Image: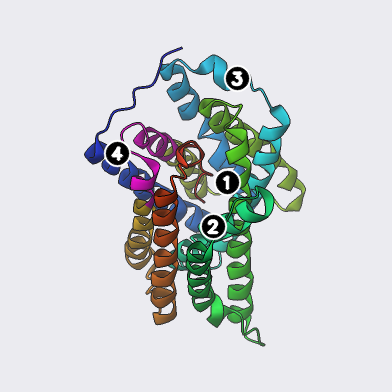
Amino acid sequence: MQTPSTQNKPGTAIALKLMAVFLFMVMAAMIKEATQSVPAGQAVFFRSLFAMPIILAWIWQKGDLREALIPVNLMGHIWRGLFGTSAMALTFGGLSLLPLPEVTAIGYATPMFTVIFAALMLGETVRLFRLSAVALGLVGVMIVIWPRLSVDADTLGTVGTIGALMVLGASILRALVQIHIRTLVKTEHTAAIVFYFSLTATVLSLLSLPFGWIVPATKDVILLVSAGLVGGVAQILVTSSYRFGGASMLAPFDYAALIFAAIIGYFIFAEVPTLNMVAGAVLVVLGGVLIIWRERQLGMDRRKARQVTDPKG
């Protein structure tokens, strides 16, 4: 097995991370367009299936194929796949109902829920500073989704509420994935975690087959296949970025997704961010950055967990 190099090249690390974040947003835009007619479960199938060849080629090139195919904790991978696939399906459903920047902003509630679950499930000590950062971020999320919570006879309002709740539910599930990964990385190779998520997501998405799969139009097939390929490349780039820079240094660059989402949303979908969305997003980002800074101060290195973070939806 080849030993991966771990060099301190901040410029390379940041470039890889930003490229990955941008590609995840391109993928999300493709999914958003396709799910206007294709069910979310079917979109998860395409996204997962067509990412697998790229991921397998990357694992083979690194010399980690044996480690990827022979897991130590198979049930751990299945549980991770169940949580992650459900989160992806909810995100794709939300993308079909909400503007891309809004989905992205709500999605960044994940670090807040991760801190909460780490205290409840892993027994981590969470003091006032991180609790304050969590509260700040959650207030930001509430500001973003508040206009969606007033359900009345207006159909659009009802649809928006459902979309916001779906994305919020996905954020909670992704936090559970992060907690699970912190346990999984103790016994499992990174290659195995990346590969088995794609495999389990592909298989589990087939369970949605009785709930309305369709024969997609040619345009939608191209979008879905491209989303899988782009998502696979993005997953490799974000994993590779941690070979050249630390997790705490790279984590804030995740929030560049908000900028990319706003640009793509405006030019592709004619979506203009609302004042609520911008104000809430600022608080969400601030809360997340404070959590990252505090974890760095405490020496809580999340490197392995971040390397195999759940693919963005």
Are the residues tagged 2 and 3 within 8 Å (C-beta)?
no
Judge from the rendering whether residue 200 lies leftward or rightward of residue 249; answer left or right. Answer: right
**From what the image shows, is residue 266 above or below residue 28?**
below
Q: Can residue 43 be seen in this snapshot?
A: yes
**Mark 2 closeness class: few <14, some 14–19, many ≥20 residues within 10 Å:** many
Q: Earlier in the sequence, mark 2 or mark 3?
A: 3
What residue does disc 3 label?
69
Q: Evaluate if marks 3 and 1 touch, with contact meaning CB atoms under 8 Å apart.
A: no
Residue to which mark 2 is pinned: 110
Find out whether residue 236 is within the magenta segment.
yes
Residue placed under numbered mark 4 in the picture = 13
Q: Residues within 10 Å of mark 1 (few under 14, many from 20)?
A: many
**Disc 4/disc 3 C-alpha distance (Å):** 27 Å
Q: Nearer the viewer, residue 283 or 225?
A: 283
Pick whichever of labels 4 and 3 is earlier in the sequence: 4
* SS for callout 4: helix
* Inter-mark Cα distance, 2 to 3: 29 Å
In the image, which residues are magenta? Answer: 233-251
Residue under numbered circle 1: 178
Q: Residue furthest top?
A: 1
Residue at image point 61% right, 59% down: 116
Q: Amino acid at mark 4?
A: Ala
10 Å crowding of disc 4: few (<14), some (14-19), many (20+): many
